[in-house]
Amino acid sequence: GQQLNQSPQSMFIQEGEDVSMNCTSSSIFNTWLWYKQDPGEGPVLLIALYKAGELTSNGRLTAQFGITRKDSFLNISASIPSDVGIYFCAGQLLDSNYQLIWGAGTKLIIKP
Amino acid sequence: SAVISQKPSRDICQRGTSLTIQCQVDSQVTMMFWYRQQPGQSLTLIATANQGSEATYESGFVIDKFPISRPNLTFSTLTVSNMSPEDSSIYLCSVIDSNTGELFFGEGSRLTVL
């Protein structure tokens, strides 16, 4: 089946550091979505990307839809303790009505 | 944005029993989905809950194991039947907001099967 390769699997960073994670695939996607999941909660949408090359920000978060439509990255600047959680990318394939393909997640841990 | 309530939020179940999870949405939605998230894993779509007709199951999931009801546009249930420890997961209800097209998730139901 279709797969998204999300990396890194986990990150240990100091508060204040910038964070970068990405997702790649061999398939072409129509939409890229970035979600965050806190413990005991369902995923919450952070950023949605709809056009190749699109660069979108949401506060300290910035995400880009790759030109080839096969990749996306998410950056978090000046991390704070509440950024801790698991970040998932999800892509919607071309010619797909609603089906999302999910990355395996990036677990962000902030060292005290 | 759609607000989704799931019940139960967590439960501990005995092997061989069945549990029904409820999903209530505060607005009418056309598309409703059930996902499974196994420990430390990403989300896997179980099925699309269709109002007034049988659910559409993804590969690897069958109606006998995961019967789904969708009596109206605001409510759905997922039953995990004849549970085994391998069914220990978080089960998530999600909907597509009819106005924005955004996918929203409930808080999930964490099942532990002993």
Image (cartoon, coloured by chain):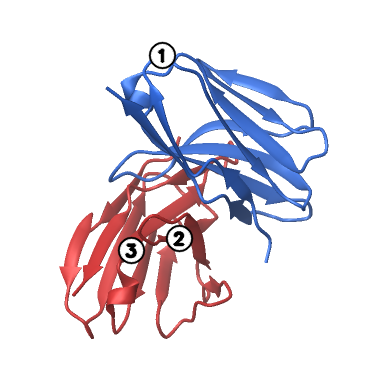
Chain colours: A blue, B red
Number of the front mark, 1 or 2? 1
Q: CA distance from mark 1 to mark 2?
A: 34 Å
Number of the front mark, 1 or 3? 1
Mark 1: give few (<14), some (14-19) or many (20+) Cα within 10 Å: few
Residue found farthest to the right: A68
Q: Are marks 1 and 3 in contact (CB under 8 Å)?
A: no
**Where is residue A20 drawn, in percent x and y?**
56, 28
Q: Are marks 1 and 3 on the same chain?
A: no
Label 2 residue SS: strand
Q: Amino acid at mark 2?
A: Tyr
Image position of B23 with respect to A38: above or below: below
Q: Amino acid at mark 3?
A: Ser
Q: Indicate left or right for A46 with A83 as reference.
A: right
Please state, as top left, top right, bottom left or bottom right, where the C terminus of chain A lies in the image.
top left
Q: Which residue is mark 2?
A: B35
Q: Which residue is mark 3?
A: B89
Please state, as top left, top right, bottom left or bottom right, where the N terminus of chain A lies in the image.
bottom right
Q: Residue at x 37, y 46 (%)?
A: A42
Q: Are marks 3 and 2 on the same chain?
A: yes
Residue A55 occupies quadrant: top right
Along the viewing direction, whichever of A9 and A53 lies nearer the viewer: A9
Image position of A18 with respect to A33: above or below: above
> Can residue B74 be seen?
no
Q: CA distance from mark 3 to mark 2?
A: 10 Å
**Where is residue A99 drawn, in percent x and y?**
63, 57
